[in-house]
Image (cartoon, rainbow, N blue to C red):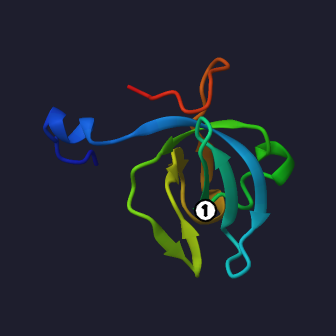
Amino acid sequence: KMAETIPFKEWQKLDIRVAKIKAVEPHPNADKLLVLKVDIGGEERQIVAGIRGHYTEKELKGKKIIMLTNLEPAALRGVKSDGMLLAAVSGEGKEQKVILLVPEKDIKEGTKVQ
């Protein structure tokens, strides 16, 4: 089911940007989480994402992703996450697939998604 509609002014509050994954580590306290260090155009951030088992460290390192940068920081199982990567999720349980949203062509980190 689709979410309810929001005014355009609400959409404008979202700061969505291209980020490059610089480093990937398994989360120390969660089997499904990875800790990513990302570059958002000269600013480095740490995000925690539930993509472990869907992507390997080798697949992720150096990949450019789409990221929500102005989400309130949160601690996920004790590790700070300062943003959220965007992904499509389909299926449930063992059939669940997580697909990262990525730029179609090479583009500079920090570029704003509009």
What is the quadrant of residue 20 in the picture? top right
Residue assigned mark 1: 50
Figure quadrant of the C terminus: top left
Residue at 24 percent of width and 48 percent of height: 3
Find residue 56 and report its horizontal and vertical position in percent: 81, 52
Residue at 59 percent of width and 26 percent of height: 103
Q: Is residue 29 above or below residue 70?
A: below
The residue positioned farthest toward the front in the image shown: 42
The residue positioned farthest toward the right in the image shown: 58
What is the quadrant of residue 62 in the picture? top right
Residue at 71 percent of width and 72 percent of height: 27
Front-most of 43 and 24?
43
Left or right of 73 in this view: 94: right
Find residue 73 and report its horizontal and vertical position in percent: 44, 65
**Figure disc tally:** 1
Residue at 16 percent of width and 36 percent of height: 9
Q: In this view, does 9 lie above or below 28?
A: above
Describe the element under mark 1 as helix, strand or loop: loop
What amino acid type is highlighted by mark number 1? Gly
What is the quadrant of residue 10 in the picture? top left
Find residue 74 and report its horizontal and vertical position in percent: 46, 70
Q: Residues within 10 Å of mark 1 (few under 14, many from 20)?
A: some
Left or right of 108 in this view: 114: left
The residue positioned farthest toward the left in the image shown: 7
Find residue 8 and report its horizontal and vertical position in percent: 17, 33
